[in-house]
Image: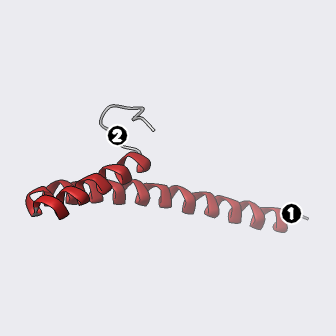
Amino acid sequence: MTRTVPGEFTEEWLLKAIDTVSFCIVEDGAVYAPILERLENELELIRRKDDVVARARRNVELRNQRLAEARP
């Protein structure tokens, strides 16, 4: 998948990049370690943001259920 907004990475793109950089580290040494760390950090940020959205959706659903149950 391509990046839709310059500067933003997709989870799929990051996973492929992590695979590639990991291979380079195994073959050539830790010189690429800072790149791997940056990619892993970006992946964590994406996953954390997605997790917040999922939690927010659950909260809204629970709120709606409570409101529906409270109606006479």
Q: Nearer the viewer, mark 2 or mark 1?
A: 2
Residue 69, percent from left and from top: 83, 68
Residue 59, percent from left and from top: 62, 63
The quarter of the image holding the N terminus is top left
The answer to which image quadrant residue 43 occupies is: bottom left
Residue 55's label in the rendered image is none
Front-most of 50 and 30? 30
Q: Is 36 positioned to the left or the right of 68 in the image?
A: left
The answer to which image quadrant residue 18 occupies is: bottom left
Real-space Cα separation, disc 2 to disc 1, in angstroms: 44 Å
* 51 vs 11: above or below: below
Q: Secondary structure at mark 1?
A: loop
Please state which amino acid type lies under the numbered disc 1: Arg
Q: Residues within 10 Å of mark 2 (few under 14, many from 20)?
A: few
The residue at 48%/55% (across/down) is 50
The residue at 19%/56% (across/down) is 24
Q: Earlier in the sequence, mark 2 or mark 1?
A: 2
Residue 8's label in the rendered image is 2
- Marks counted in the figure total 2
* 62 vs 46: above or below: below
Q: Is 27 positioned to the left or the right of 3 in the image?
A: left
Residue 71's label in the rendered image is 1
Q: What sort of colour scheme is used for the picture?
A: secondary structure
Front-most of 33 and 47? 33
The extreme right residue here reads 72
Residue 16, percent from left and from top: 36, 50
Q: Is 31 positioned to the left or the right of 44 in the image?
A: left
Please state which amino acid type lies under the numbered disc 2: Glu
The residue at 16%/60% (across/down) is 27
Residue 29, percent from left and from top: 10, 63
